[in-house]
Structures are given as C-alpha cells and as structure tokens.
Amino acid sequence: MKVLLLIDSSSNSKAAVDEVANRSFPSNTKVCVLSVYEKISPINILKPQGVSCEYYAEVDGKAFKTAEKMTENAVKILHSKNTTLIVTTKIIEGSPKSAILKEAEIFGTDLIIVASYGHETFVDDFMLGSIPIWVAIHAKCSVEIVRK
C-alpha cells in the first residue's frame, strides 16, 4: 500500500500525522510525507517600492526550511509510533492543488491523507481555496480527510 500524507504548517496537520502513526497498515506500507509550498515571485505580484529580489529569495528559502522542518518532525513521529512503515519525504515548490495530484500519480498512491483544512481562518480558506476538498474531488485514489 502507498499512502501520501500531506502536511503543512497548520495545527490541523499534526492530526493527520498522528492518524497515520497510530493506524495499523499492511506490512511494507510506504508513506510519502509531502509538503508543498508556493514560491513568491516578484513577477507574479506587484513589487512594492524598494523591495529587492533578494527579499523574495529569502522568503522562499524560509518557506523551504519550514517545509523541511515539518517533514522531519512528521518522520520522527511516524518512526517513533509505527516502526513498520517505510517513510520517505518530498518537498515540492508549486501550486499545492496541482502538485499534490501530480505527486499522487507519480507515487502510485492508494490513499491520500490530509487534515480537514490547512488554513487557520475562514478568510484564508475563502481566498486560497480548500485544498482537502479540491484533492478529494479530483484525486484518482481514495482520500481521507482527518479532523483535529
């Protein structure tokens, strides 16, 4: 079995990690912990006066470091609670909706596990869209949405 575990910086994401860590899966189940971040491009947004390209590169670097730290923490939790899982990680820069679906295809995913929503406020969900709902509607495999 192949499980794609989606994580982000929200507090809800830990519930998804715990769900995978505490569940009994068939032997040799492969879990790919996936974090997707969007790169901030000065070309795609209006560049405020005096903001340099180095600033955007620094923000992108921090986003990658945050994703790296989140995936490392998820792996520690998974290994500490469920030693039978074969765990890998992947960090992708791109639009979360398309990157998740593409990675699910590449990985040959049987099950995607995602937290109920990654954003902390209704405004974030409204502006950015609900990624779990998008994934559930468009994925070609089963999707489990975990509540906190």
Image (cartoon, rainbow, N blue to C red):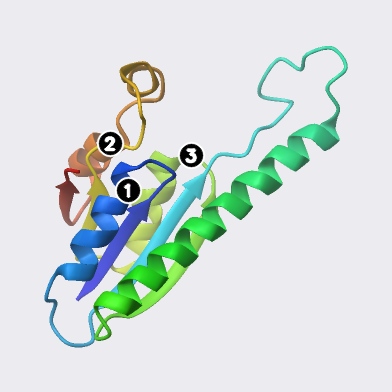
Instruction: Say whether residue 111 is visible.
Output: no
- The percent coordinates of residue 104 (x first, y second) are 33, 59
- The percent coordinates of residue 130 (x first, y second) are 30, 30
Amino acid beneath label 3: Ser
In this rendering, is residue 81 above or below 19? below
Name the quarter where the N terminus is drawn.
bottom left
Name the quarter where the C terminus is drawn.
top left
Residue 117's tag is: 2
Query: Which of the two discs, 2 and 1, labels the residue nearer the N terminus?
Result: 1
- Helix, strand or loop at label 1? It is helix
- Helix, strand or loop at label 2? It is loop
Q: Nearer the viewer, mark 1 or mark 3?
A: 1
Q: Nearer the viewer, mark 3 or mark 2?
A: 2
Amino acid beneath label 2: Tyr
Tell me the residue that label 3 is attached to.
Answer: 95
**Residue 89, quarter of the rendered image:** bottom left
Q: Distance from label 1 to label 3 (Cα)?
A: 18 Å
Question: Residue at 65% across / 33% down in the picture?
Answer: 40
- Helix, strand or loop at label 3? It is loop
Front residue of 146/93: it is 146
For the view shown, which residue lies furthest in the top direction?
49
Query: Which of the two discs, 1 and 3, labels the residue nearer the N terminus?
Result: 1
Question: Residue at 34% across / 42% down in the picture?
Answer: 11
- The percent coordinates of residue 128 (x first, y second) are 40, 25
Amino acid beneath label 1: Ser
Q: Distance from label 3 to label 2 (Cα)?
A: 16 Å
Tell me the residue that label 1 is attached to.
Answer: 13
In this rendering, is residue 22 above or below 103? below
Residue 38's tag is: none
